[in-house]
Image (spheres, rainbow, N blue to C red):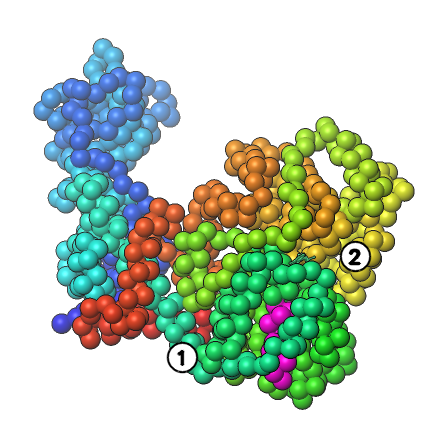
Amino acid sequence: MELQLSKHSVQKLKFVGESKSKQLKKIGIETIEDLLFHFPRRYEDRSNLKKISQLVPGEVETLRGKVTRVEIVKPRPRLNILKCYLSDGSDVIAAVWFNKIYLKKSLKRGTEIIVTGKVGGGIWGKEITVRDYEILSEQEELHSGRIVPVYPATEKVTQRFLRTLIWNALQKYCDNLVEVLPFSVRKKRKLASIGWAIKNMHFPDNFQVLEKARKTLAYEELFILQTALAKIKNNFQNAKGISHLTDNSTIIEFKRSLPFLLTGAQERVWKEIQEDMESASPMARLVQGDVGSGKTILAALALVKCCAGGFQGAMMAPTEILAEQHFLEFKKLLKPLGFSVELLVGSLTQGEKEKILEKIKTGTLDILIGTHTLIQEKVEFKNLGLVVIDEQHRFGVGQRSALKEKGYNPDMLVMTATPIPRTLALILYGDLDLSIVDELPPGRKEIITRYVAEKNRKKVYEFIKQQLKMGRQCYIVCPLIEESEKLDLEAAQTLAEKLQNQVFQEFKVALLHGKLKTAEKEKIMERFRDGEIDILVATTVVEVGVNVPNANIMVIEGAERFGLAQLHQLRGRIGRGKHQSYCILMGNPKSEESKKRLAIMTKTSDGFKIAEEDLKIRGPGEFFGTRQHGLPELKVANILKDQKILEYAKRDVSEFVAGRLQTTLEEKERIQNIILHNFNFKSL
Ligand code: ADP
Ligand code: MG
């Protein structure tokens, strides 16, 4: 009989009552399954403990011995020393505790104990000052003489308690663990059984065994995750979508009207998009291209194709500034073709909004651009044929499907500049097809990036002045004062005023920040684009998407406070025109990590390299944060170390979903069930 461990409370276990189960819940353990999957944080090798006679004075050592005698010494008032003499047959040593006389009652003669501490000694014999100890019980094999698991624990849920609890649960329930992976896969990849893997993940006999257990579990985890993503993709592709079959004349006309030719990479990706749009299954394509690679024009092409066939298109961007920029550009590009474009953002008046909503509903509007306002209830399209999501990493997976829901299986194009290492893209975007724009438009010069120390601030200002005199423009990004948006704003205001009044009197300085009304933001961006403003002091509102090719200097204040991905995005605002661009990192990096980040920035402008370094510095946990991507957390697999496993799992999954993997019906159903239970498809 199959016992569903996920349905059995830990209260079923010995030693777990009402209050213990509450304490366990705090570390995420409610069911027996949770407990068995509560993996060690690290392991301690206690398999080869030294004999007392071999201990080296002055070193921190760990030893195991039997209590022969306990005494309490009171050398002065308020100081009690507990001395517990331990023997292991080779010699005797006194374990010493200060002011812990209550321990005396647990240290009965004959009790076995493990202690770690600094070894000393004098004329009265060897001593060890205890830092850490464990009293061994009947189940002493759990806590010593072996590789011992060290768990995420709390004061109330101690290591010893967890170890014993998990050990007991393993004895009793390990055989009830359900094998998830099909037998054929386990055989092909030489994986262990789930029961064996779980047991050895907790109590391995040696480190080789542990690695095999870990690999098995990591493989299973990645197999399930990727199967779920593949399923979403399949569901989507099997749905009947729109074939955007139009004659090519509008596209040709549009391309001709552009002031430039598409790059090779843009042409290639456009072809991929076109094929997707023409096919009857809905497009789900991710276009990844470094900052400045020219993704917007691909969105415009797709929208033109969509509207030429009489359908409506929508484009969602994460900030109002970016939405507005797209709106202005598309209006300019698409009006001549006879397509109407509107902007829907939160700050419109009720009347304005209603007018636009009406046009969308009746179908008199072709293209709607906006922020997350687009996914609000009131927005109803007559015949939505394409949704474009720009800077998609800023949206949750849920938000991108919400926009899709506004139509009947419309095509979906998502764009991101967040350069994601290939392995990560395999997981994160397993449900999307991937196109990569791996070429920058011609004539771009490599951005020169320097770290400048505070004492050279004057020189930086002199340099900026020279450039401004030649007609260029400059961004100065304010430091993040993480605790408070209000403080951020004040700092920005102070900086802008100081620059205008004391440094750049003969130039125009303006401040742009998130708290401004949309109309004001628009006005400032318009004046910056038109060259009326020379220096734009900004908070990170300019981080994504903003495109003013004449601006060629980016000064980032307090650069050490920004993450690599963000620095790269900020720097991406320049280097967009024909002029040599300069990125100046100011600040005072103190930690090794922040120094490293800035060094990477000065060395490379390749987004992929930067992302890889970022992943290394931040670690997969943070990079692969659940919140950001709406995907489940990985418990065992480490996408950095386990790239091979990831690739293998990917291969097996595609065989599996194509029905080419040898499986029994039961195995198939089991995987389907697990996916149904563990993945919330609605939110995906
Ligand atoms: P991103 O990929 O960061 O969204 P954009 O789409 O904003 O980049 O494009 C950056 C700049 O490059 C824009 O000014 C755009 O007009 C220009 N651009 C795009 N494609 C080309 C091209 N093929 N040739 C020349 N300039 C281009
Ligand atoms: Mg862009």
Q: Residue furthest left?
A: 89
Residue 600 horizontal/vertical position (percent): 55, 38
Which sits in the foreground, 637 or 444?
444
Residue 639 horizontal/vertical position (percent): 38, 51
Residue at image position (77%, 31%) is 459
Q: Name above or below for residue 116 compared with residue 658.
A: above
The residue labelled by disc 2 is 529
Quarter that holds the C terminus = bottom left
Density class for disc 2 (Cα within 10 Å; few <14, some 14-19, many ≥20) is: some
Which sits in the foreground, 77 or 629?
629
Q: Name above or below for residue 323 compared with residue 149.
A: below
Disc 1 is placed on an element classified as helix
The residue labelled by disc 1 is 238
Q: Tell me the magenta residue range.
A: 299-310
Disc 2 is placed on an element classified as helix
Q: Is residue 664 visible?
A: yes
Q: Name above or below for residue 85 compared with residue 104.
A: above
- Cβ of mark 2 under 8 Å from ligand 1: the answer is no
Quarter of the figure with residue 208: top left
- Name the magenta segment's main secondary structure: helix
Q: Which mark is residue 105?
A: none
Q: Amino acid at mark 1?
A: Asn
Q: Is residue 496 visible?
A: no
Residue at image position (75%, 65%) is 518
Residue 163 horizontal/vertical position (percent): 23, 48
Q: Amino acid at mark 2?
A: Arg
On screen, residue 197 versus residue 680, left or right, reads: left
Quarter of the figure with residue 495: top right
